[in-house]
Each structure stands twice: as C-alpha cells, then as structure tokens.
Amino acid sequence: MIRKRKITFVINYFYPDLAATSQLMTELTKHLQQNFTITVIAAQPGYAGENHGSHKLFEEAYVENIKVVRIKLPEVNKNSKISRIKYISSYFLLANIALLKEKGTDVIFTISQPPVLGGLIGTIGKLLKRSRHVYSIHDFNPEQAQAVAYTNNQTVFKIAKAIDKLNCSYADQVLVVGEDMAETLRARFKGGKVPNHTVISNWTDEDAIVPLEKTEPEIREFLELNGLQDKFIVMYSGNLGLYYDLENLIQVAKEFVDQPEIVFLFIGEGAVKQRIQTYATENKLENVKFLPYQPKEFLKYSLNAADVHLVVNQKGIKGVSVPSKIYGVMAAGKPVLGVLEQGSEVQRLIFESRAGVVIEPQNYQGVVHAIQYLKSLDKDELKAMGLKGRSYLEQNLTRETSINKYRNVLQTVSDHSEPDATRSIEQYERAVHKNK
C-alpha cells in the first residue's frame, strides 16, 4: 500500500476563526484530506475576539480527518504595536516547536502570516526536518507595511526584505494570489534566479453564496432589524484593517448627509474600527452604521443586503496584496465600487467582468461621483452589472479550479525525493549569502 504524503500546514488562522485566510485554508485542507495526511498548526481562535478558554500551551484535536495542533497565545490588541509584537513572537516560537515535534512531514506549507516570520518557519523547518517547503504569499512584506508607513525604520525594512527573499529562494514552490503579485516576486529577484512560483486565485464557495433578492425573508429581517429598509446600501464587509485607507474613505459619507436614503454599512472588525466609529460619532454621521462580523453561514444574506460593495486598497498596495472579499461580492452578484490602483489584480477582474467601476486610491471626490453614478442607475441596470461579476466568477474563478491547482502543486512537490541533508544546508548557506 502506497503511503499518503504528509503535509503540515502552519497557518496561524484555522476553523473556527473568522479571518478570510482561516476560511480559505479550512476549505482547502478539507478538500485535500483524501489525497494527503494533513496536520494543521494554528493559533487558538481569537481573530474577532472569540474566547477559546483553553489553558494548554499545545492542544490537539481533529476536524474531520485533519489533525489540528492549537497554540495558546497572548491576547492581541491590534492598536498596540507592542501587543502585536508579543503575539507574533509567541506564535513564531511555539509554531516552530510544534512543527519540529511533528513526525514524518513530507511538505511544510506556510503562509505569509505573520509577516516574514510565516515564511521563515518553513525555511527553518525545511532545513532541520529535511522536508520540502511550499510558501503561500497572500501579502508581500515588508512592502505592505512600507506602503502605509507602519514604521519609518529603513533598517528594519531592509532586514525583513532580505529574510523574506531568503524564504522565497529557499522554498520549493512559491504561491501568489494574483498576477500583479507574481510581477512583484519577479521584481524582487530582477537580474537573478526567480523562484519557482504559481499564481492561484483565492475563492469563495460559489454554491453557498449566490445572488438573492432583498425580498428574501432572512435579508428582509436583517434590513428591518438594523433600520435599513428602503435604503441604498454602500457596504464594506471584511477586515477593517490598516491597509485600506478607511480612516479617509469614511469622510466621503459627509457628502451624503443630505441624502438619508444612502447608507454606508461597515461589517467586520479590525485595527481602525474604533477610529472610524469615533469619526462617525464626532461628525454626527447618522448615515454610517457598524455591525460585527456575521457568521459564515449568514454571509449569503448579509452580502446580498448591499446595493454596492466597496472593495478597496491603500495606495501602494498594488502587487502586494489582493483583497479576497472580491470573490464573495462577485458570487453574490453585486456591483463593485473598487478603490484600487490601475493594473492591480482586482482592478483587472472588475474591468474584465464589467461588474463595477474603479477609482484610484485617494481620489475621494471620484468616490463621491462614483456613488452618485451607481445610485442614479436604473435598478435593472445595477442588477445586470452585478450579475456580470457572478457570470465571470463561474467561468474563471471557481473554488474547484483553485483547489485543483493547489492539489497539483502539492502533489508535484511531495512526489520529489527527499533532498539530501548536506545539499540542503549548502543551498541554505548560498541563499543567505546571496540575500545579504
């Protein structure tokens, strides 16, 4: 009997965490468990304030046939850099210990969370365990942090970039979630050997999230409960984080205070939520509402409650990150107002599908005009625009398409013979020297 190859996923967020990467990686591993023996190393749930109540440093459980090793970490205050550093450092240390304790791993799969250190876990694991490493990059760092001036310490950026280049060059396969991110990877290694890499789009469950009318009982109840009946809803659903310029975009709502039928609805949690709530309160913006993350099974209703969805990124994020909320919006068949740089992955998707309009980041008056334009459209025109996104998704961006690409990459990487230990160390030393 042929032994199934074992893949150990070190991925920070996993079911039942509400983070987008948790939902993606949970679906991915569930679909791959028939092909591989899978262990997941992840933090205890807590992305949106979930209380897990565990006192054990390491705790093992199973999700279907997937072994899950949970790591107990300190609570994180996303508004505090010190709290974030403490959380990330604890995760890095404990995830490495958990990985080294895991026996018989053929392939280590890591993602780019926490920034840079997520990939470094795979680099260390490959070196010490003689395993192969697949590095899945959802966000390029330090480029992402640099774009929003998270710190102005250029030495930190240079060291972080050198480490992540090492992670990429030493990995057996690098995965990126957009064509623009593949360009960034190639630019990192301009003039040198570009690592083996594959573009695999993120996805949503297009069978679970489908276009629905506002007359659907669950949607009607949601609207009534939140005082949103007969409103034109501009919705942002997802992480209210540092990389979306939400602190400035919220100011657009002031332009519509004399049009009470237009409401801005923010659903989610994140580092800037308190700031934008404070701004809305101080400016008496009654046309702005906030709701917490909705349960996964309710997303098909909450996403369909919108008339237009905001999909945004901060200036400088092109080729660095791809907002995965676009896939849920397209699955729901809703029009998109993208605040995105030209040439970015999601701008391309909106342009090719014709499912909405795109404004350059920091062009706030352009956002105002775009909302006015979308509001002026006939209801049937607006509906047809959104359904173009659904049609495009069904043809190009299905869950099955992306998961099959993951399966093929992981099968190819795992089928290679184990690397010779001496050769691995020599490769590592050469990579360190090259990236200094």
Image: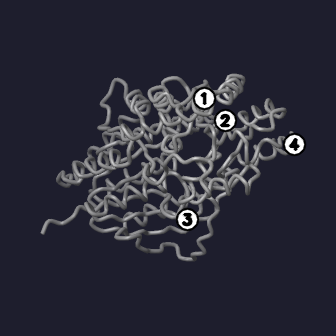
Where does residue 411 sit, x and y in percent of width and height? 23, 52
Inter-mark Cα distance, 1 to 4: 26 Å
Residue, disc 1: 315
Q: Is residue 129 left or right of residue 307?
A: left
Q: Amino acid at mark 2?
A: Asp
Residue at the extreme bottom = 55
Q: Amino acid at mark 4?
A: Glu
Q: Secondary structure at mark 3?
A: loop
Residue drawn at point x = 62 percent, y = 58 percent = 48
Residue drawn at point x = 32 percent, y = 32 percent = 194
Q: Nearer the viewer, mark 1 or mark 4?
A: 4
First-in-chain label (1 vs 4): 4
Does the CB distance between marks 4 and 2 fall below 8 Å?
Answer: no
- Classify mark 3: residues with Cα within 10 Å, few (<14), some (14-19) or many (20+): many
Q: Is residue 38 left or right of residue 153?
A: left
382 vs 299: above or below: above
First-in-chain label (4 vs 3): 3
Residue, disc 2: 245
59 vs 404: above or below: below
Numbered mark located on residue 282 in the image: 4
Inter-mark Cα distance, 3 to 2: 27 Å
Q: Nearer the viewer, residue 202 or 286?
A: 286
